Image (cartoon, rainbow, N blue to C red):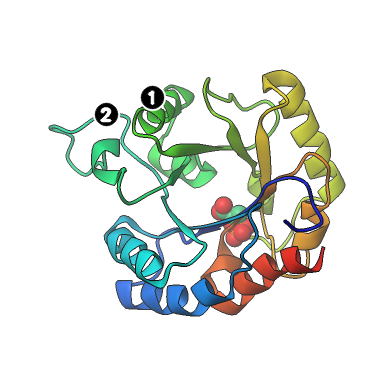
Amino acid sequence: MAGLDKNIWVIANWKSNKTIAEALDWVSKVGPEIPKLTNLKAVVCPVFSALSEVKKAITVGNFPLMAGSQDLSPFGVGAYTGEEPVELLSGLASMAILGHSERRQNFGETDEMIIKKVDQALKGNIIPLVCVQSEKTLVPQGCKLIAYEPIWAIGTGNPDTPENANKTAKVLKEKYGQDLEILYGGSVTGENAKAFIFQSNINGMLIGRASLDAEEFIKICKVMERI
Ligand code: PEP
């Protein structure tokens, strides 16, 4: 275990990016470089079409990396065109990002839908990671992993301060339980990751743009070796 006595999640959210070939190239570069620390939980969330190949590459390489999905269906298997139900994702994804602000804004996702998705994830033993945009966003019951992601910080190069992220995480814990693990997301890079990791109420980062670059993601994971 590294010098920090808490889990640190480093989660790559690739959004709608990377072909299968590009995804496999990333895994082959990143997998061998991730520090083998029991408290470092590295996860990559590709598009659905690459998930199976990414999962296979991680398993074959025996890398300390999990595969996750960027969403899942609020329903089970059946007549739900275009949706990915938990029953079909269970063997592939260890975790699912739910309620990302891009889904709320572009796909009309509501708190009610996110509650259903969390229930589905829990049924299928997939860890739900719910994104909240502020301390006011609803955290569904049963969800123990949260990402605080202020909308203005996503993809802008303008992250929240580590101190403010910590304060927001503290409020969320007071509201929803001290056992929550809270990540920060919004313009995280290899340069600023360490400052977030060191905040007492923060358990890691959800990373968009910087995670697309294998070298940058490795750099973020390797912060854990030096603390
Ligand atoms: C995200 O979309 O979850 C995210 C944090 O993006 P970025 O790192 O690009 O700000």
Q: Is residue 131 left or right of residue 94?
A: right
Q: Quadrant of the N terminus?
A: bottom right
1 and 2 marks in contact (CB < 8 Å): yes
Q: Badge 1 is on which residue? A: 116
What residue sits 14% from the left and 32% below the top?
78
Q: Amino acid at mark 2?
A: Phe
The image's mark for residue 75 is: 2
96 sits to left or right of 213: left
Mark 1 and mark 2: Cα distance apart in space: 8 Å
Question: Dot 2, crowdedness within 10 Å: few (<14), some or many (≥20)?
Answer: some
N-terminal-most mark, 1 or 2: 2
Q: From this viewpoint, is residue 132 visible?
A: no
Compared with 1, 211 (above or below) is below
Q: Is residue 224 left or right of residue 83?
A: right
Q: Residue at x 18, y 33 (%)?
A: 77
Residue 20 visible, this angle? yes
Q: Is residue 118 above or below residue 163?
A: above
Write down the quadrant of residue 221 in the picture.
Answer: bottom right
Q: Considering the numbered disc 2 on the image, is that residue within a helix, a strand or a loop?
A: loop
**Disc 1 residue: CB within 8 Å of ligand 1:** no
Does label 2 point to a residue whose CB lies under 8 Å from ligand 1? no
The spot of residue 6 in percent (x, y) is: 73, 45
The residue sitting at 48% across, 25% down in the picture is 111
Q: Quadrant of ligand 1?
A: bottom right
Q: Nearer the viewer, residue 63 or 75?
A: 63
Image location of residue 219, percent across then percent down: 68, 73
Label 1 crowd bin: few (<14), some (14–19), many (20+), radius 10 Å: some
Type of amino acid at the residue the image marks with label 1? Lys
Residue 70 in picture, x, y percent from top left: 42, 49
